Amino acid sequence: MNLPLLLQFTREDFIDRYAGSVLGGLWAFIHPLVMIFIFVVVFANVMAARLPGLESSTYSYGIYLVSGLLPWMAFANTIGRCASVFLDKRALIGKIHLPLAQLPLYVVLSEAITFVIGYTLFLGFLIVTGHLPGAAMLLVPFLFLAQQILALGIGLIFAVFNVFFRDLKEMATLLTTLWFWFTPIVWVLDIVPPLVQDIQVHLNPAFLFVDAYHRVMVHGQIPEMDGLLRLLGIGAFVLLLAYGLLKALEKDIRDFL
């Protein structure tokens, strides 16, 4: 797929989300703004004292929550939307020979735009309240790239099998919902037993990027390179596996579509 076509798909996808609404693209700013206000301002006063391991500040819990929630939303949305990408574009796939392996990339780019908008508003709040983490936040683009490689790989695996078993789109949504609650996004790792902490560190790849965002945005620290390299390794492996499955089943996929 050439770059102009990929950018056109991305533009159409982003615009189609708000097609027909009065405010149009402004909703891309309104949604994250309202979410940040609710979690940072409202939840801060309710939950901050109940979660150990965070700096003592009115906004600590809200910042902790939003700094993990925004990347998680991009991660989960990428998986869920990639799962149905071949079915969503089947009319076009039937007319022109699109490279299936590259097709989900427009979803990744579209979610990247949404993420950038949300995180820009979040950074604005951090500047106003004096909680900007400093130079460590320059690592955020790298963290986002690492998590999206994994999301694309998982989403592509679901996309391959969803052509044959249509229930897998719903299973992808269920998976990411359960995965969300299993990952320390709304809760802090310190409050669970050591065994659960070990499971998070060694068996939950989502923990690797969520913890990195928390270290950067909440504590202003450089995340452990070990974890980031593991995340990249896992993401690359899953993406290569997905690509291999797609190539092995591509003819059947096109026939089914």
Image (cartoon, rainbow, N blue to C red):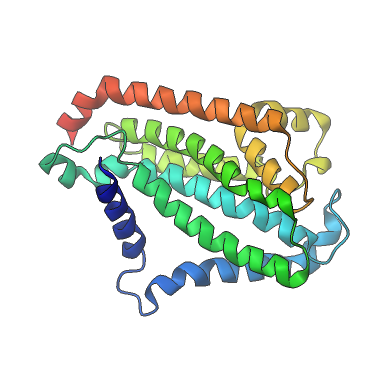
- What residue is drawn where x is 55% and y is 66%? 32
- Residue 88 image offset from top left, x and y in percent: 26, 47
* Apparent side of residue 56 relative to residue 103 in the rendered image (left or right): right
Q: Which residue is drawn at 30% across and 41% down?
A: 103
Q: Can residue 198 be seen in this view?
A: yes
Q: In which quarter of the image is residue 162?
A: top left
Is residue 40 found left or right of 111 in the rendered image? right
- The picture places residue 104, in percent across and down from the top left corner, at 34, 41
Residue 246 higher or lower than 156, as above or below: above
User: Which quadrant holds the N terminus?
Assistant: top left
As drawn, the residue found furthest toward the bottom would be: 22
Q: In which quarter of the image is the C terminus?
A: top left
Q: Above or below — where is 55 with respect to 249?
A: below
Whether residue 22 is situated above or below residue 201 in the rendered picture: below
Between 196 and 64, the one nearer to me in the picture: 64
What residue is at 84 percent from the left and 52 percent from the top?
A: 54
Asked if one can make out residue 217 in the rendered structure from this viewpoint, the answer is: no
